[in-house]
Image (cartoon, rainbow, N blue to C red):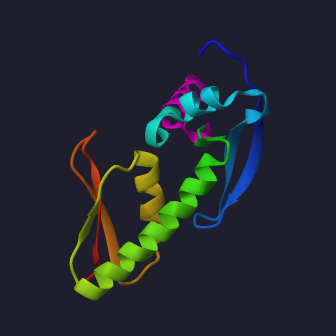
């Protein structure tokens, strides 16, 4: 994108999946605020695109057995968004339990949908599914019967 940035590799525990994940953390200390804002993009679309490209390039010549997902982080965006998603899913789970009705969650990236599916995978009374086609794909949270 025409400017340099340092990237640190860090391995973090994914508590839900009980696995280690590789995070590529962009050092924002040398970037002006307008560059950070540009890289993050509206609703995280910029950092999602960077993450998609990074994963694609890294996996170009790797065997399927060697591939793993890489999370790109900038300025704490991913950790903050993860906390927002956890709070949102707790609220939605309560509403589903109270009403017995499914709730549609829109405006989520595919990575965010995967995270929410993993939040609910061990929840006995709640099920999730994705519906629709990109870019209008949504996540449905519903009672498990």
129 with respect to 23 (left or right): left
Q: Is residue 70 at least partly visible in the picture?
A: yes
Residue 128 at x, y percent in the picture: 33, 67
Residue 36 or residue 94, whichever sits in front = 36
Q: Which residues are magenta?
A: 47-66
31 with respect to 16 (left or right): right
| Magenta run includes residue 43 | no
Residue displayed at 45% across by 43% down: 43
Residue displayed at 73% across by 34% down: 28
Q: In the rendered image of this protein, does residue 1 appear above or below residue 26?
A: above
Residue 97 at x, y percent in the picture: 31, 85
Residue 18 or residue 74, whichever sits in front = 74
The majority secondary structure of the magenta stretch comes to helix
Q: In the rendered image of this protein, does residue 32 appear above or below residue 21?
A: above
| Magenta run includes residue 61 | yes
Residue displayed at 51% across by 62% down: 84
Name the quadrant containing residue 29.
Answer: top right
88 with respect to 136 (left or right): right
């Amino acid at each position: 994108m025409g400017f340099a940035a340092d990237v640190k590799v860090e391995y973090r525990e994914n508590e839900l999946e009980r696995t280690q994940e590789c995070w590529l953390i962009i050092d924002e200390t040398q970037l002006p605020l307008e560059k950070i804002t540009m890289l993050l993009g509206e609703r995280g679309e910029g950092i999602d695109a960077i993450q998609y490209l990074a994963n694609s390039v890294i996996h170009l010549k790797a065997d399927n057995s060697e591939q793993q997902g890489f999370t790109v982080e900038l300025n704490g965006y991913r950790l903050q968004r993860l906390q927002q998603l956890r709070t949102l899913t707790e609220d939605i789970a309560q509403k589903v339990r109270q009403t017995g009705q499914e709730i549609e969650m829109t405006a989520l990236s595919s990575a965010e949908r995967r995270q929410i599916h993993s939040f609910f995978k061990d929840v006995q009374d709640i099920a999730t599914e994705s519906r629709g086609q990109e870019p209008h794909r949504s996540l449905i949270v519903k009672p498990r019967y």
